Image (cartoon, helix red, strand yellow):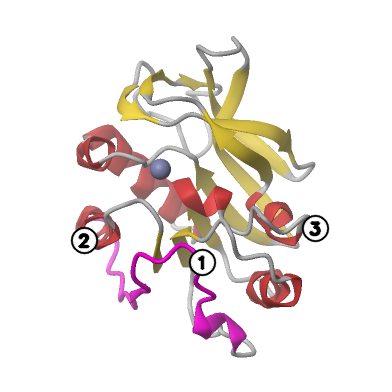
Amino acid sequence: MISGGCCHDYISEDAIFMKAMSTELPVEWTVLYTGRAGDKKVELYNQPNWAEGYDIVVHNECYATVDDQEFVEKIVAAHAKGVPGMVIHCSMHSYRSLESDEWREFLGVTTRRHTAQHNISVKVLNPNEGPLKGFKTDWVTPLDELYVIDKLWPNAKALATAVSPEDQTAYPMIWTNDYHGARVFGTTVGHSDATWDDPAFRDLLVRGFKWAVNRE
Ligand SMILES: [Zn+2]
C-alpha cells in the first residue's frame, strides 16, 4: 500500500483498510507512507520492477503537481507487467499536472476536478453480478467529493455512477479497468474521515481488493 500526499489522514485510512481486510483474507501488508507533501516523487517508483513480488499495489496517494513523465512511466510499467492495482480517491488527481496520459490510462479514468462536498447518492449499475453483487444498492455517502470524470478509458467499465448536483451529469465513481491484462479497481470517493468510517465504504474496499487479486 502506497499512501501519502496532500489533504487526507492517510495513517488512519491505512489502518482502516487493513483492519477491514483482516477478517477477509490473510494479507501480509507492506505499507509505504510518504508524509503529507503533495509534490513528492515516491523514491520507490524509481526502482526497476518496484512492484515485483506483490500480489497487488493499493494506491492511496495524492501528488497532483508531479509532472515528470519519465517518472510516471516507471510507476505504470510495473503494473503493465501484470501486477494488479487498486486506486482510491486522490490517486485519480495524482500526476494531474502531467499532460500525457500514462497514469490515467492505468487508472481507467481521466479527471481533473471535483464537486463541492455533498452526500453522494450511489447508483450501482449491476447489482446482480460482478464485484458489486450484493453491495448496498441505496448507499448515500457521508460528505465527500464527487470527481468529475472527463473520460472513461476504453478498457474501463463503470460499476456505479452518481449524478453531480452541479451539472446534473452522471459520473462513474466505482469502476474496474484492464490495464494491459492487470486488474485495476478504482473509486473516487474517500475524501472524508466519515466516509472511511462508513461500513459501506469499507465493504467497497474489501470488494475491490478481492476482485483485483481475483479472490472473490
Ligand atoms: Zn479529497
Image coordinates of residue 53 in percent, x first then y, are 51, 85
Q: Is mark 3 on a helix, strand or loop?
A: loop
In the image, what residue occupies the spot 49% across and 68% down?
56
Q: Give the range drawn in magenta.
A: 22-46
Tell me the amino acid under the disc marked 1. Answer: Asp
Of the residues shown, which amino acid type is indicated by label 3?
Ser
Ligand 1 is found in the corner quadrant, namely: top left
Q: In which quarter of the image is residue 103?
A: bottom right
In reply to whether residue 27 is colored magenta, the answer given is: yes
Report the magenta stretch's main SS.
Answer: loop
Please identify, in this view, whether the residue under mark 1 or under mark 2 is nearer the observer: 1
Q: Which of the two labelled residues, at mark 1 and mark 2, occupies the earlier sequence position?
A: 2
Point out residue 80 in the picture as x, y percentages from the top left corner. Answer: 71, 70
Foreground disc of the pair 3, 2: 3
Q: Please tell me which of labels 1 and 3 falls first in the chain.
A: 1
Q: Dot 2: what SS?
A: helix
* Residue 10, image quadrant: bottom left
- Residue tagged by mark 2? 15
The disc at residue 39 is: 1
Which residue sits at x=60%, y=44%?
176
Residues under labels 1 and 2: Cα distance? Answer: 24 Å
Question: Is residue 216 in sight in this rendering?
Answer: no
In the rendered image, the residue lying farthest to the bottom is 47
Is residue 13 shown above or below 118? below
